[in-house]
Amino acid sequence: MDIQRFNLTARLDYNPESLDKFVDLCEQAILSITENTQARFLLKTAVDELTLNAIEHGYGKEPGLVTVSLEHCGDAVRFEISDFGKGIDPTKVRFDRIARNEDDLYARGWAFSILDKLSEGVEITGNDPHGSRISLLVPLKEKIIVDL
C-alpha cells in the first residue's frame, strides 16, 4: 500500500505522552508515503520539531489543535503543519543561521534554518482566523547540504 495523502488533526497537551503519540502516528504515515530514507528523516524531524514548537510557542504550553498533512507529489512530498495558536511573524524567523563554532550549536532556534536547507524551502503563512501554517516540499532525490 502506498499512502498518497495523509491528514491528522489532534488536540495535544504539553506532555511527552500526548506529543509522542501524535508524532508516532505521523511517523507511521511517513513510512508508508515514501521509502526514501533521507526524505523520511527530514519529514520525521519536521513533525517532531514543529509539533513541539506549535504547542510550546503557539499555545504557550497549553492544549491546542495541531494538524499535520503529507501529500506525495511526484518527486517530492509536501509537508504542512498548522495550528490556531498565537502565530509566527515570518520576518522574525532566522533561515540564515550558520554554526561558526561549537557554542553556536547549543543555542535554540535551529529548526527553521535546518528544515529550510534540507528541503526546497520553508513557507510560513497565517492560519485563518489565527495561528500559523508551515509548509515545505521534501525532495525524494538526494540533496547534499553544506554550511549547517
Image (tube, rainbow, N blue to C red):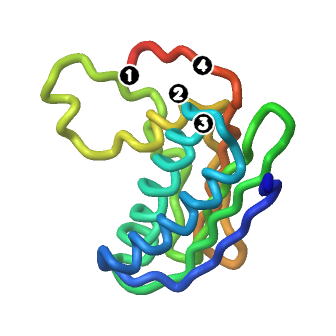
Looking at the image, residue 28 lies above or below residue 44 = below
Q: Nearer the viewer, residue 137 or 3?
A: 3
Dot 2 lies on which element?
Answer: helix
Which label's residue is closer to the chain start, 3 or 1? Answer: 3
The location of residue 27, given as percent across then percent down, is: 54, 58
Q: Is residue 29 left or right of residue 145?
A: right
Dot 4 lies on which element?
Answer: loop
Q: Nearer the viewer, mark 2 or mark 4?
A: 4
Q: What amino acid type should be assigned to the residue bearing mark 3?
A: Ala
The residue that label 1 is drawn on is 148
Q: CA distance from mark 2 to mark 4?
A: 10 Å
Q: Nearer the viewer, mark 1 or mark 4?
A: 4
The location of residue 126, given as percent across then percent down, is: 66, 63
Q: CA distance from mark 1 to mark 2?
A: 8 Å
Looking at the image, residue 48 lies above or below residue 128 = above
Furthest residue in direction front, as rendered: 1
- Tell me if mark 3 has few (under 14), some (14-19) or many (20+) residues whose alpha carbon lies within 10 angstroms of its own: many
The residue that label 2 is drawn on is 117
The location of residue 81, given as percent across then percent down, is: 61, 61
Which label's residue is closer to the chain start, 2 or 3? Answer: 3
At 13% from the left edge and 29% from the top edge, which residue is drawn?
A: 103
Dot 3 lies on which element?
Answer: helix
Which label's residue is closer to the chain start, 4 or 3? Answer: 3
Q: Which mark is residue 143?
A: 4
Contact between labelled residues 2 and 1, with CB atoms less than 8 Å apart: yes
Q: What amino acid type should be assigned to the residue bearing mark 4?
A: Lys
At 36% from the left edge and 76% from the top edge, which residue is drawn?
A: 60
